Amino acid sequence: MSIRRDVLAIAFVAISALLPLVLQTIGQRQVYWLFVVSELFIFAVVAISLDLLMGRSGQISLGHSGFFAVGAYTAAILNEHYRVDVVLSMLAGGLLSALASLIVGFPATRLRGHYLGIVTLGYGIAVDQIALKWDALTGGDQGIHLHRPTFFGVPIGSPVAMYYISLAVLVVVIILTWNLLRTRIGRSFAAIRDSEVAAAAMGVPIARTKVLAFVCSAFLAGLAGALYAFLAGFVAPEDFGIDQTLLFFAMVVIGGMGSIAGAIGGTILVDGLRVAASTVSGLSLAILGGVIVLVVLFAPSGLKGLLRARARSG
Amino acid sequence: MLTVRGVTVRFGGLTAVNQFDIDVPDSGVFALVGPNGAGKTTLINALSRVCSVAEGSIELNGCDILALRSHEVVRAGIARSFQRAEVFPTLSVIENLLVGLHVDMTTGIEGALYLPATRSQERDAHARAEELLRRLDLWDDRDQSPADLPYGHQKLLDVARAIISDPKVLLLDEPFAGLTDAETPQLLKCIVDAGVNCAVLMIEHHFELLEGIAQRITVMDFGRKVAEGPPAQVRTDPETVRCYLGTSRC
């Protein structure tokens, strides 16, 4: 990691860590803003997970809200119905989501491009519909309310506690993803994206690596989903529809694929726009769609590409 | 010893390689020549399991190569480069070489934790890659994207990535194509050095260049072997002259 990137990373964590204190000092709508930024951290984890799949291994996913939903419902059901601890519920959410990813991971070994996009889209819609129709397990359109999330017996429902947990999870995910990408498996993801025939000639098992990319990506998205369930205190199908997938997709594309910083930057921009546009009733998705079109037209490499071009010219 | 017997490759109604036999000893430089469309690249693709073989057998020291999938061939000891440099543009030059060490390394998903075992393996792999980069004068390019390199350097990298896996048989598909006169001696030395420890089977059109390094040249035409022997013998072989070298009208 370059020194400049190190400084940026430390500054990001320091500012994020101090934010609750700043909000407390200002004293205005602290709970609301803590929720908004915590949600942003969680979405950043999903964006990183989607970038791992799309930006790094070159596979498309139009159903990432499905992985997010599996994690959220798993954690909600385990915590609310079986009183399973928050950390274990989150890990279970990630693991079940990873397991569910095999449903699309195996077709991914034979499909690519638009065809894989359609399979993943179908998966996302199917999960959404299952959440809606399987009342006994998911509560149907009533969803599941989480009442008493605990961390080893200690209640952690406060907005400040959830904020710091979300930040900690994001930081850990960034470190783990960074490590993965600079070691053998991360390089094999990039190799299969760039040239499958050359990757195979170097001994990279193409099918297994593609499935592994799906599993890793889904684990992180599931983990984020589980955390989201605890943050929101409520899970319902409306949080995991196609518009949510579009949001995640936009975060990665606008940030610039193939970059953790890009995924985080894209999340800040897209989620910031979503929050700002939510005041304009019914138009938030339209505004977001417009921004995506502009980015694809004028900055196809996203924020990452813009910054790199500026650095080169400067 | 790589033993190829009766290998036939068909694409629909076209027979690209037809009942081809070749023995490649454990070390030395061996060449495949022939006119365009003779089936040379298809043969290399068959040996590296990139394309299916309709008939015949391929064995490396008794190991049935045809029983392997394409990604398992390098573990058996066969590495290859490509006619058009198939580098990984989103990885740096050194990372490209590290992909060449994929089968020598064992780090899996636990690499995310960057434990001491992973760190040590990465350090060793980097040391091997850096040594090769220095040897090939690619050191200054190590952190660049291969896409930003001149084509000759990309070809060098493509060959280096095959060499770093320490193969028993190195298959090179026109390694000198696109190289400048300045870059050629560098790669030439690299190939000759590689031929000391392993067998190099290369496709090449520069006959004069092969005469200096190849122990044996095999000539292909229409998927068949039409001549084989030391360079001096093959140069005067009537079949080689007919189908490949041609005759001067002067």
Image (cartoon, coloured by chain):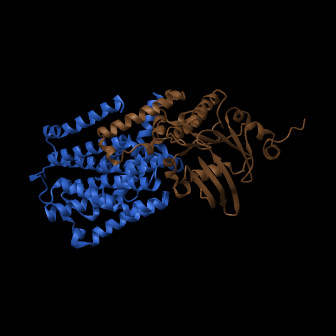
Q: Residue furthest left?
A: A154
Give the residue displayed 35% in from the left and 52% down from the top.
Answer: A217
Tell me the quadrant of the picture where the N terminus of chain A can be found.
top left
Side of A275 relative to B153 (left or right): left
Which one is in front, A140 or A87? A87
Q: Quadrant of residue A245?
A: bottom left
A173 versus A215 height, above or below: above
Side of B188 relative to A279 (left or right): right
Which one is in front, A175 or A6? A175
Give the residue displayed 54% in from the left and 27% down from the top.
Answer: B137
Give the percent coordinates (x, y) of residue A240: 30, 61
Can you see residue A304?
yes
Chain letter, colour brown? B
Tell me the quadrant of the picture where the C terminus of chain A can be found.
top left
Give the percent coordinates (x, y) of residue A36: 23, 48
Give the residue displayed 59% in from the left and 39% down from the top.
Answer: B27
Q: What is the tally of numbered marks visible in this picture? A: 0
Side of A304 relative to B20 (left or right): left
Give the residue displayed 46% in from the left and 39% down from the top.
Answer: B91
Can you see residue B150?
no
Give the percent coordinates (x, y) of residue A112: 49, 57
